[in-house]
Amino acid sequence: MNWTAILVLAAAAIGTVLSEAPEAGPCPVGWLDFSVDPISPVCLKFVMYGKGTWSGLRSLCQAEGADLAELKGELHHQVYEYIMDNQELQDEDFWIGGTDEGHEGSWTWISDDSPMEMGVPHWYPCDPPQPDGGTQSNYACICTPDFFFHSCENNIKIYAICQISAFGLVLIEEAGSCPVGWVDFSVDPMSPVCLKFVMYGKGTWYSLRGLCQAEGADLAELRGELHHQVYEYIMDHQDLQDEGFWIGGTDEGHEGSWTWVSDNSPMPMGVPHWYPCHPAQPDGGTSSNYACIYTPDFYFHSCKNDIKIYAICQI
Ligand SMILES: [Ca+2]
Ligand SMILES: [Ca+2]
């Protein structure tokens, strides 16, 4: 075999390797791909070279062309699931990209100084509810064992989660309108979200699901950020604040396996949507098979089958 033949064979081999290589994801080598939408890639890295302060590890992220991770919306739950799947992460705490430094009590994301969503569902609501600690605790972290957001003390040394943030921004165009009587919760015009707090009368999950369906809708599925949007809406409307509302989740017929009603897909369990304090939700076994959000916390709960409350419908 002469050199030309070897080169041809080598080239053919390289070609084969390339053609069989998996399609490249959007994240560089060493970064985890948490992208949901290819338009807005999300690449994270659990930085466990060493523990450090928030600013120290922020610099380390920045040295890699990244910044501390901003666990907005569903990303918080995705990260929680990843931690639950990786035991070496489960006893640790991690800095994330939120702070109230210089504006005590006003928490902002570091990439654009936009306000962090406070309260339900991201911040730890049990004793002591987070954030706390005043000016001694100015940096956001997710902490073992709950992995909700906490305000960590300024001088502690923990690990961090970095996120590559230099990708294109998601364009939010003017949201589409909802039918009269429905509240527009749309974030993305491609997928309008129209909700109605049905307060004609209280009823069981089944009876109010029927009422939603009679309007061409179904019980609301408070997926991802929509849960927080609804919580904010309730906080802005006092007449809603002492109530409970059925939502479109159930474990009827498959006890303990909660699914959304529209497509029987699994509901994300645990952090951050389900109430984590005493008693942690869901509970109640087969006598509590329907999901609700309930005053005063408005996390997801498993409500008793025979209670009568209001409902939230969704088109
Ligand atoms: Ca503070
Ligand atoms: Ca149940």
Image (spheres, helix red, strand yellow):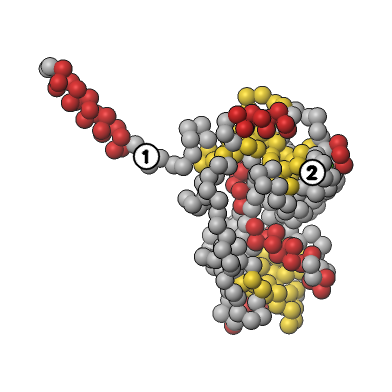
Q: Under 8 Å from ligand 1: the CB of mark 2?
A: yes
Q: Residue 250 at x, y = what percent?
A: 62, 64
Residue pictured at 22% horizontal, 28% vertical: 11
Upstream in the sequence, badge 2 or badge 1?
1
* Above/below status of 224 relative to 182: above
Residue pictured at 67% horizontal, 47% vertical: 112
Query: How many numbered discs?
Result: 2
Relative to 150, is 249 on the left or the right? left
Q: Residue 1 at x, y = what percent?
A: 12, 17
Q: Which residue is mark 1?
A: 22
Looking at this view, name the residue that lies furthest to the left. 1
Q: What element does badge 1 sit on?
A: loop
Q: Which residue is mark 2?
A: 100
Instruction: Give the spatial CA distance, label 2 vs label 1.
Output: 42 Å
Residue 265 visible to the viewer = yes
Q: Amino acid at mark 1?
A: Pro
| Rendering quarter of residue 8 | top left
Q: What element does badge 2 sit on?
A: loop
Q: Residue 243 at x, y = what percent?
A: 79, 70
Q: Amino acid at mark 2?
A: Asp
Relative to 102, is 206 on the left or the right? left
Residue pictured at 73% horizontal, 74% vertical: 310
| Rendering quarter of residue 22 | top left
Residue 261 visible to the viewer = no
Q: Quadrant of the C terminus?
A: bottom right
| Rendering quarter of residue 92 | top right
